[in-house]
Amino acid sequence: MATLQALNSADTVALFGRFVIPNYRRFPVNLVRGEGCYVWDSEGHRYLDFFPGWGCNLLGHCPPRVVQAVQEQVATLIHVPNTWHTDVQGRWAQMLAERSFGGQAFFCNSGTEANEAAIKLARLHTPKEKYKIITFEGGFHGRTLGSTTATAQPKYHEGLGPLVAGFVYAPFGDLDAVAARIDDETCAIMIEPIQGEGGVRIPTREFLAGLRRLADEHELLLIFDEVQTGCGRTAHWFAYQHFDVTPDIMTLAKALCGGLPGGALLTTREIAPSLRPGMHAATFGGNPIAARAGIATLETIEEEGLLAQAAERGAHFRRRLQALQAQCPLITEVRSVGLMIGLELAVDGAPVVEACLRRRLLINCTHTTVLRLLPAMTLTAEQVDEGCDILAEALQSLSA
């Protein structure tokens, strides 16, 4: 069988211009290969990737155990409907339950699908008159209509009205404001335990504990969107474990399958039956390939000691970036938990991203002024230093 030959970057950009809807702002680079913390373009240039897969490639590019598991599975059984059982989906659910708060899993394909399932489950589990869900300014929950409405950022709502009824927005970190918004129609509180797209904003333990208390007092469900924070990103299996506050429902995706599409909702055995047959589904959810990839991802993290390594690398990043902050007036704050890192700037961050790209370092900017790094757990101390040196050079060139 003939191998598909890669195009150069210019021809690939032209191909996209003719045939792909331009709903993304893309860099004019054609990436053709990845290994660990590096990717290569069609011209042979190597890039150090501090934002691999938009946070999905937590194990780096093409992690060996995941690659092997998928290769074995794709030759055995690719897809069957969820009207049948597969042992790999059951084992995957067991592994997630054992590393979190127990309970049961619903599988889907993405974070937005997991959050849509959580929204449905919250409404189904509570009395019919209860339908409102409190979410938080600066949060992000996905791109489908329900999760877009849950995202309390007006820029994502433009031109989409009318939106889904029942979402009430509160300031992130303001417990009194949350209490004031609870009424007889409220069924749930939904929050990212650490805001990702919102700029790596970290709440206090008291705030999340207060949400748990309010939920218990008013018989509400507490939903944690751990799409970005889950599966080891914060150097714990899940971010809620940093705060000792356990949700009723947790949503996962991104790093869940080591770079392959996969999402999940986890909830308690008491709540799970409310997502009853006929009320929700995902055709490809929990398919054998995703399940094998998910199992291999968890095994890799555990057997290679990557939670501890993520804590070490996160501390290394923090030392380097705080030292850089002391030298560079453009950085106003460094925020991080494990390998979830945000640098607040006093200026627009887009030119910094471009300057790093020219130096072969891939990073992200969110909320205009926050540089966001979501590097792989597998990166070495030398790669931390390599990337921080490039970032320092890019910032210093712009500040000059």
Image (cartoon, rainbow, N blue to C red):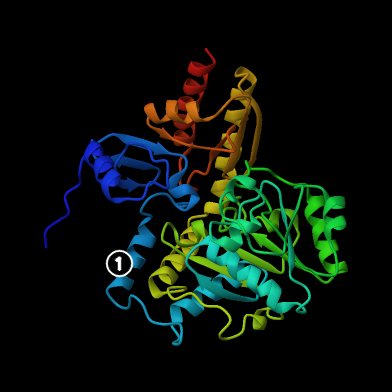
User: Can you give x and y, in whole percent of width and height, for residue 181 in the image?
Assistant: 83, 58
Neighbourhood count class around disc 1 (C-alpha, 10 Å): few under 14, some 14–19, many 20 upward: some
- Above or below, 67 against 339 in this view is below
User: Can you give x and y, in whole percent of width and height, for residue 89 in the image?
Assistant: 47, 77
Q: Is residue 391 left or right of residue 203?
A: left
Count of number-bearing discs: 1
Q: Which residue is mark 1?
A: 71
- Tell me the quarter of the picture where residue 74 sits: bottom left
| Pick the front one: 188 or 307 | 188
User: Can you give x and y, in whole percent of width and height, for residue 399 in the image?
Assistant: 54, 16
In the rendered structure, which amino acid carries the disc numbered 1?
Answer: Gln
Which residue, as the protein is rendered here, is positioned at the far top?
Answer: 400
Q: Quadrant of the N terminus?
A: bottom left
Q: Is residue 215 left or right of residue 305?
A: right
- Above or below, 160 against 350 in this view is below
- Residue 31 visible here: no
User: Can you give x and y, in whole percent of width and height, for residue 236 in the image?
Assistant: 62, 55
At a point 80% along the width and 51% down the height, the residue shown is: 207
At a point 52% along the width and 72% down the height, the residue shown is: 107
- Above or below, 114 against 394 in this view is below
At a point 61% along the width and 67% down the height, the residue shown is: 99
- Residue 367 visible here: yes
- Tell me the quarter of the picture where residue 65 sits: bottom left
- Above or below, 70 against 369 in this view is below
At a point 56% along the width and 66% down the height, the residue shown is: 114
SS class of the residue under badge 1?
helix
| Pick the front one: 103 or 168 | 168
